[in-house]
């Protein structure tokens, strides 16, 4: 069989390693074989290819030192940096939040842990958020990917970029596109990729929309968001493509202009009315703004076109559960189980839904299955925390105490478990232990109100009015609608005003 034909067959069947080896043998015989060179370039690119539309991870440099926002004090419902300000935002009293203060969604995505508001919160994020690599900036992640990809060529890089004449390759469209993707994805050399894209755009007299999109991707990776916006808009004028709209919305999201991103998404929907990625993007933006009714509406539209969309099913189920409709949430989670999703998180959610829907025979079975499937300590801690809530529901305080202790054993940063342990110790009259637990919860969850209110009530009981005043003030700041916190804060403020 012809080696070139066999190499192309390997490429079509996604057997990239075999394809690269065959192309290498062909190039050893004839180093000027352009077909083998191009195929090997594409195969190496596919081995490390990452969809730029979905990947959007932010580190401290992007979160705290971001100077691309338009307004430092945004109007309510117009900024992704100010959680809890959108219309239809859920009450902080019944829906848990992420490290950034937004309500938990049903699906883990890049960037869903939220943006810390201060450097102190950002530095604390690695201990508590369990994101992939929160302490480093995004550029560091790309560099690490590039060095890992070099392992595929033990004799050194396949293409020596320093010796390439980009002007020559820019004149040859077919070779230039394969070379660009190799430089951008495999080598992660954005500056050289940008140079090639700029020369190729000039060579085609600015008439090729594909090169404009690639220029926009390079600018976005380099943090030049306004230049990226111009390139994507120009590409859309020439050729309307779904990916180009998605890239443009990524730019607006990074610039903290979610309403503009929604407008662009809706313009794209007029051209591509049944595109799942666009509908999902709108739903994610509304989730980020805490406008959960609109988010649920668009997730339902997603399910209208694709009834196996895991993210939409999980997010709708979560919204129903926190809207006091566990029976409906249970139907959605069972749908995920029927689709073959089989993990700790799903059985954990099934156990909670069964408990609140009064299907007690299935509750503990689901939690047992969740623990058996768990491979991460953080997931196991969440399961034990929820079993503790079931124990509280049936009045078994000793079992609840043991479950919360187990949650802390598996995850020493579990703020909710510390808070509940403090409440149980307070009921037993152990003031010092309760105080210690509440203080631990405050350090780990500075955006919530429960540990601050509980600590304020404890200090009020023991006569430490200054600490009670400070904690109740923080509780009111985190959750202004909490009546007990407001009442305690007013009493303490009145007391201090009379001194």
Image: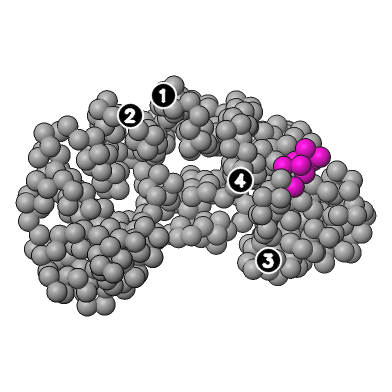
Q: CA distance from mark 4 to mark 3?
A: 20 Å
The local secondary structure at tag 4 comes to helix
Q: Which residue is mark 4?
A: 310
Residue contact at pointers 4 and 3, CB within 8 angstroms? no
Q: Nearer the viewer, residue 130 or 199?
A: 199
Quarter that holds the C terminus: top right
Q: CA distance from mark 2 to mark 1?
A: 8 Å
Q: Which residue is mark 2?
A: 240
The local secondary structure at tag 2 comes to loop
For the stretch drawn in magenta, the main secondary structure is: helix
Tell me which residue sits at (35%, 69%) in the image.
17
Circle 3 residues within 10 Å: few <14, some 14–19, many ≥20: some
Tell me which residue sits at (12%, 70%) in the image.
30
Q: Which residue is mark 3?
A: 374
The local secondary structure at tag 3 comes to loop
Q: Quadrant of residue 422?
A: bottom right
Magenta includes 109? Answer: no
Q: Which residues are magenta?
A: 326-334
């Amino acid at each position: 069989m012809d080696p070139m034909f066999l190499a192309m067959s390997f490429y079509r069947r996604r057997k990239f390693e075999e394809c690269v080896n065959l192309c290498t043998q062909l190039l050893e015989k004839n180093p000027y074989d352009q077909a083998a060179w191009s195929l090997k370039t594409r195969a190496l690119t596919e081995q490390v290819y990452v969809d730029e539309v979905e990947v959007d991870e932010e580190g401290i440099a992007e979160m705290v030192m971001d100077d691309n926002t338009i307004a430092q004090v945004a109007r309510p419902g117009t900024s992704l940096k100010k959680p809890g300000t959108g219309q239809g935002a859920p009450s902080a009293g019944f829906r848990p939040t992420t490290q950034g203060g937004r309500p938990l969604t049903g699906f883990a995505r890049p960037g869903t842990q939220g943006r810390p508001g201060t450097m102190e919160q950002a530095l604390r994020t690695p201990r508590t958020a369990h994101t992939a690599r929160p302490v480093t900036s995004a550029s560091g992640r790309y560099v690490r990917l590039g060095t890992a990809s070099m392992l595929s060529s033990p004799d050194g890089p396949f293409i020596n970029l320093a010796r390439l004449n980009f002007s020559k390759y820019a004149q040859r469209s077919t070779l230039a596109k394969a070379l660009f993707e190799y430089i951008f994805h495999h080598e992660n050399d954005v500056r050289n990729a940008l140079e090639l894209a700029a020369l190729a755009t000039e060579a085609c007299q600015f008439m090729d929309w594909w090169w404009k999109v690639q220029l926009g991707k390079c600018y976005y990776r380099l943090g030049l968001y306004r230049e990226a916006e111009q390139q994507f808009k120009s590409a859309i004028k020439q050729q309307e493509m779904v990916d180009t709209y998605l890239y443009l919305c990524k730019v607006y999201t990074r610039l903290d202009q979610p309403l503009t991103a929604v407008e662009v998404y809706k313009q794209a929907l007029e051209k591509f009315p049944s595109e799942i990625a666009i509908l999902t993007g709108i739903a994610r933006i509304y989730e980020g703004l805490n406008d959960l009714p609109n988010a649920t509406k668009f997730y339902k539209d997603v399910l209208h076109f694709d009834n196996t969309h895991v993210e939409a099913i999980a997010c709708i189920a979560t919204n129903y559960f926190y809207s006091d409709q566990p029976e409906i949430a249970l139907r959605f989670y069972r749908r995920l189980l029927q689709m073959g999703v089989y993990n700790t998180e799903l059985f954990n959610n099934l156990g909670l839904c069964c408990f609140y829907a009064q299907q007690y025979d299935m509750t503990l079975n689901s939690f047992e299955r969740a623990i058996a499937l768990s491979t991460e300590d953080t997931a196991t801690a969440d399961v034990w925390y929820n079993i503790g809530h079931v124990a509280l529901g049936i009045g078994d305080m000793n079992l609840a105490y043991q479950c919360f202790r187990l949650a802390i054993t598996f995850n020493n940063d579990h703020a909710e478990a510390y808070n509940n342990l403090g409440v149980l110790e307070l009921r037993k009259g152990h003031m010092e232990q309760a105080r210690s637990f509440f203080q631990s919860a405050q350090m780990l969850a500075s955006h919530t109100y429960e540990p601050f209110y509980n600590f304020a009530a404890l200090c009020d009981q023991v006569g430490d009015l200054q600490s009670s005043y400070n904690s109740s003030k923080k509780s009111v700041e985190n959750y202004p609608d909490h009546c007990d916190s407001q009442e305690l804060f007013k009493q303490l403020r009145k007391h201090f005003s009379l001194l």
